Image: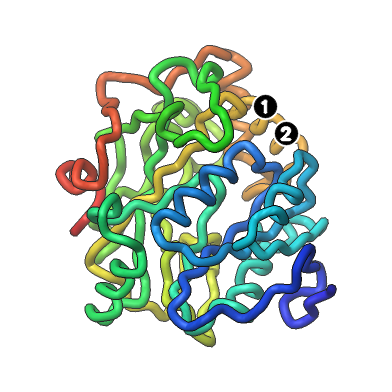
Amino acid sequence: MIVTTVSGDLRSVGRDPVAARAGEILAFACVRNESLRLPYFLAYHRGLGVSRFIVIDNDSTDGTAALLQAQPDVDVFHTAGSYAGSHYGVHWLNGLLRVFGCGHWVLVVDADELLVYPDSESVPLPQFVGMLDRAGADGLITFLLDMYPGGPIQDACYTPGEPFLAASPYFDVSSYTPGSEGLRGRLPERGGPRRRLFWPAGQERRGKPPYLQKIPLVKWREGLHYLASTHLIDGLTLSSTTGVLLHFKFLADFARRSRLEVERGEHWDRAAQYEAYAEALAVNPGLSAMYEGSARYRGSRQLIELGLMMA
């Protein structure tokens, strides 16, 4: 079935999608070859309280499409279109959010990201967004926290379905640069292990290290649209409470995926960030992110104590 009201290059596969029920929280994602991470990604966010997933499969070749279609709570849209040509998935996501998201709290995340908010271990997501509603907020800003293993990245072997933290439980306590003024100034903007490892001081590279602030949780309504991934969206009242996206890029497939993305050239700035990753790993295949400022993740309260999340 071609869903022309969404986008000319998105085609629903499997069962026909239906309108969400009142009060359902929807998660949206754009993925390519994520069969390794998707089982736990889905299980984790189901456990938080996501009712339904709407996922764009960008022409995967690793069984991702079949895995997604086998899930009773996932609606799948396929496209063979250019990721770069869709403004890095933003046009596809905005189209689906316009059709399915209006009137609902939506979570827009990548398959290697897990949402954490204050006491998310015990407070279900429906209860948390109810708190945001009562506070008059319709958006949650988060800090993207890169997680890494306790040894070489290439040795971070991971079995699908296991918690990501079993393979990659460490993070940088500091090593960040502050954000701009206002609410964004309360969260780090850049830095962490990716800047330490791939944009070291004094070394020239094309492009900047990744921007680490995102707005993935939104009460969607007519007229909203993301402008640059989930980093930027206008027209929201952001909560003074903030969240964190635990980011699990550093598993054993990191070097291979980096080389493939350099060849494809479909990511931002002709995949400049992936070029930085691939070059550094080619020089030092046994690269580890561990250093004296590393800490093992213990939970959301730890992030509040460290000033990486605000309650």
From the top left corner, tell me how far across and down residue 2 is, in percent: 83, 74
Residue labelled with disc 1: 256
Q: Which secondary structure, mark 2?
A: helix
Marker disc for residue 260: 2
Q: Which residue lies most toward the left here?
A: 305
Q: Using residue 172 as the reference point, say whether residue 7 is left or right of it.
A: right
Q: Which residue lies most toward the bottom here?
A: 222
Whole-angstrom CA distance, mark 2 to mark 1, is 6 Å
- Kindly identify the amino acid type of the residue bearing the numbered disc 1: Arg
Q: Is residue 98 visible?
A: no
- Kindly identify the amino acid type of the residue bearing the numbered disc 2: Leu
- The number of discs equals 2
Give the residue drawn at x 47%, y 56%.
46
Compare residues 235 and 156 and report the one nearer the observer. Answer: 156
From the top left corner, tell me how far across and down residue 169 is, in percent: 37, 30
Q: Using residue 116 as the reference point, say whether residue 197 is left or right of it.
A: right
Q: Which secondary structure, mark 1?
A: helix
